[in-house]
Image (cartoon, rainbow, N blue to C red):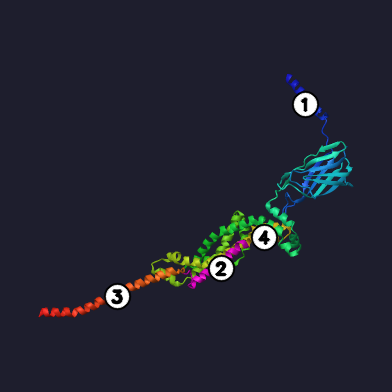
Amino acid sequence: MQHRRWTLLAALALALTGVFALAAPQPARALTTEKATARPNEDGGSGVIGGMDTRLTWEGTVEDGEEVTSVTLTLPEGASFDHSTTRITALEGLSRMDVTGTATPSGSSITVTFDQTVPAGSLLRLEITNMQFPAAGGGVVVSGSYQTGDGSHELADSEPIATIANTPLQSIVNWLDQQPWVQAWNSNQFLGMFLRPQLLVTSFASLAPGWILCLGIVVAAYPFAIALGLLFAMLKISKWRVLRAIAIVYINILRGTPLFLQIYIMFFGLPMVGINIDNNLLGIIVMAINSSAYLAEIFRAGIQSIPQGQYEAASSLGMNYVQTMFSVILPQTVRRVIPTVTSDFITAFKDTSLLSSVGVMELMMFSKNLTTVTGNITPYVAAGIFYLIVTLPLIKVVGTIEENIARSERGGGPRPRPRRRAEVADGAAERMKEAEAAEGASVSAAVAGVSALLASPNARAKEASDVC
């Protein structure tokens, strides 16, 4: 019984507390913030970048029994309402009210004073264009105050507006936007569609991850392609008919079918048989297999270009076939096929663009997405420039290697270093001394020989007289 009594007293106390709370005066707000949004200004994206012109839309509802005469919106330090334009919209139910006013910007805040009061129950909307959020970015909260008949009141903070920090790259784009020559350039239909400077700058930053992935795929795939190509080249020149048949079928099928088809078979066929591999790894495998067929023919032609005399010379030295191939033939083959292999590497690097058809986020896939968002062809041109960054130096390397090989085959090669005059004079003096010494030695030998010839008759005569 005692326990039930305490329970009833506790319930009564809670009820009285609730009654007093409801009876206590609540702070009245004549204007309730509904929402605050910003228009995306990211070129090729859906984000809001600080330090760039955008549009701020703020909405609030006037509560019953109150009338609003002015609204002040305040943003964090670094925002700017200078040179902005404000549009006022007031709705009473579904009817639009004829409300006008004057906007007075002041740094990071703006005050909108209405020519007539906004009545209770109205939806008030302020659209402020050509304003800028803080360049530092972050969650930007719209706060401020408003005026009613009984004085000034604080405005409830809005939900944070996610803002992207303004980067040095974006600063360059802003600078380009202000240049007269850029505006004249973009006014040309062709130049504005294919070579828009602002979009070209942003494309380089956006496409860089795809370019790195392209390089990673071809660089990772090519060592395996070289190993497979060398293997099938050896099989194709083998004395065993079965091995030659395997190599011929492998090489002809891969070289005779489009890479596009091979990619589709690998990416969509393998999952059907229960083999699931990461897209990037599968791209490396496809590129390695395809390139190996072409490299096999390159290595086969290089091996067969070595004269038969090289094999005979190695055999005369007691080398077997394997020793001959790896010690004599292949080193000469590698030297001869380097230009062709480099050209095939360039082709393989460009062929990675076909992987975009199966969702690999390489260079052309990034370009396609950016072009779809912007409606401009400039990202594809930027992708082409990325390809040229790799291919042009390699083309120059191939040309240099071919020139060196051709010069060495003509008997060119490096020449001796020209000697100075003093070195030539010293060498001539040494040779003259050597010649004189040699000449003196020969003269002495001749004199000794003659003396021996002259002395020999007298010695024979003396021997004869002794005998007698």
CA distance separating discs 1 and 3: 138 Å
Say which label, 1 or 3, has the lower sequence index.
1
Q: In the rendered image, which quarter contains the C terminus?
A: bottom left
Q: From the viewer's perspective, is residue 225 above or below residue 51?
A: below
Q: From the viewer's perspective, is residue 248 above or below residue 99?
A: below
Q: In the rendered image, which quarter contains the N terminus?
A: top right
- Which contiguous range is marked in magenta? 388-415
The residue that disc 1 covers is 14
Say which label, 2 or 1, has the lower sequence index.
1
Does the magenta run of residues contain 75?
A: no
Q: Around disc 2, counting alpha carbons within 10 Å, would you say few (fewer than 14), some (14 to 19), or many (20 or more)?
A: few
Q: From the viewer's perspective, is residue 65 above or below residue 247?
A: above
The residue that disc 4 covers is 382
Badge nearest the viewer, 4 or 1:
4
Q: Is residue 87 left or right of residue 314?
A: right
Can you give x and y, in whole percent of width and height, for residue 170 in the image? 70, 53
